[in-house]
Amino acid sequence: MHTVIFALLAMGAGACIALQASANGNFRKNLGDNPLCAAYLSILGTIITATLAVLVLRPTPPSAAALRETPWWNWIGGPLGALIVLAGAALTARLGAALFIALVVGGQLLCSLALDHFALMGLNEQPVTAGRVLGALLVVAGVLCIKHL
């Protein structure tokens, strides 16, 4: 049962990414074709939302030792998130929401296969199999269908 709930939550997150990219793409247009300002203001909204959540939920802060011992690659999520927001703001209106998201998903899938296969970034090893390669090829085929059909 938990797997179904987690899958639905992940699908909801995917819907949020599509909505976010579309909103940021339109934001860019409304700000005079300025993707950097659209990304900045969108991320500012993220900071405000996270700050309010921390103030309301009051989670226990991590210790200084835990912060010092955290691997460097744990800190790249924020900058990578900013690049994703900027890409959405700059590219969604030009590519369309479906093609942009299909390409994003394709990139996520290919990178994820490598992360799993080589057990990078603290993940458990999950070797690339014929089924996984077929799944990735089907996503690429889907991108081509969205672009050309």
Image (cartoon, rainbow, N blue to C red):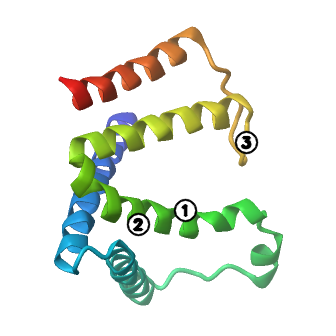
Please, what is the three-letter code of the amino acid marked with disc 1?
Leu
Please, what is the three-letter code of the amino acid marked with disc 3?
Leu
Q: Which residue is mark 2?
A: 86
Q: Residue at x 31, y 25 (%)?
A: 144
Residue contact between numbered discs 2 and 3, judged by CB atoms under 8 Å: no
Q: Which residue is mark 1?
A: 80
The answer to whether any part of residue 101 appears in the image is: yes
Give percent across and percent down for residue 63: 74, 81
Is 41 drawn above or below residue 143 in the view shown? below
The mark found on residue 126 in the picture is none
Q: Residues within 10 Å of mark 3 (few under 14, many from 20)?
A: few
Which sits earlier in the primary sequence, circle 2 or circle 3? Answer: 2
Nearest to the observer: residue 62 or residue 40? 40
Secondary element at image label 3? loop
Q: Residue at x 39, y 65 (%)?
A: 85
Give percent across and percent down for residue 83: 49, 64
> Which quarter of the figure is the C terminus placed in?
top left
Secondary element at image label 2? helix
